[in-house]
Image: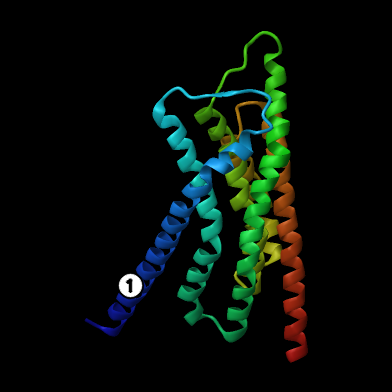
Amino acid sequence: MNNEAVNVLQHFEELRKRLMIIAAVFIAFLALSFIFVSDIYQWLVKDLDFKLAVLGPSEILWVYFMLASVVAIAAAIPVAAHQIWLFVSPALTGMEKKVALSYIPALFFLFITGIAFGYFILLPLVLNFLMTLSGEMFTAFFTTEKYFQFVLHLTLPFGFLFELPVVIMFLTSLGILNPYSLQKIRKYAYFVLIVVAILVTPPDFISDILVTLPLLLLYEASVSLSKIIYNRKQKKQAVLQ
């Protein structure tokens, strides 16, 4: 076996090791989350103006598992980011390592911010709008599973999408992206974000708009941050020359 094949196998072994650590940490946080999941559920439903129904004995277990999974994902993000950094760090320079490491805490906080944005801002707007559509013609009846699926669709995607600025800033710092390339692909990025908004929202035009606008603003903010990082990098290179 030649050296190139050996190196490829070593990289795969290293990747498998990092993925196993991430999976083990996620499972550990998932188990820990189940201890508090009942309290989390009670906190989420305490201010609802309607009662949630359970249609089967397994439904509440599914909801508990979903809530615990979201908590476990949030808690595991810093660990996952660190493991990814350990995997790619041998190929980075000393400065690139410091830059990559500095972005890890931001990933966690932006994920939580995205979840909070979806839950505290978008969810009430969309839910109130949909409730007004029924008026007095229908009796609102929500099952626990359907309600939390609805909540999940309006919150979890924003947890990941809010990390877009950090990812773009990091890739700009490494020279992989620049604000000008982001501006060139703007129309394609807009199309992808609009499709994402339509997929994660209920099938009504108002909900699509309420979700699409923040995503487009998030992309534009990412472009602006990329420009700041890019200009700062260009100035440093000019000074060194």
In the rendered view, would you say 218 is above or below 17? above
**Residue at the extreme left of the image, as rendered:** 1
Taking the spot 60% from the left edge, 29% from the top edge, the residue there is 202
Q: Looking at the image, which residue sits at the far top?
A: 137
68 lies left or right of 215:
left
Whole-percent x, y for residue 156 in the image: 58, 45
**Residue 3, relative to residue 216: is it above or below?**
below
Q: Amino acid at mark 1?
A: Glu
Residue shown at the point (70%, 9%) measured from the top left: 136
30 and 34: which one is in front? 34
Q: Quadrant of the C terminus?
A: bottom right
State the SS at label 1.
helix
Q: Nearer the viewer, residue 108 or 88?
A: 108
Location of residue 20 in the rendering, given as x and y in whole percent from the top left corner: 37, 64
The spot of residue 106 in percent (x, y) is 65, 64
Q: Residue at x 52, y 73 (%)?
A: 85
Name the quadrant of the N terminus: bottom left
- Res. 69 visible in picture: no
Q: Nearer the viewer, residue 87 or 222?
A: 87
- Categorize mark 1 by other alpha carbons within 10 Å: few (<14), some (14-19), many (20+): few
Say whether residue 118 is visible: yes
Label 1: which residue? 13
Q: Nearer the viewer, residue 178 or 131?
A: 131
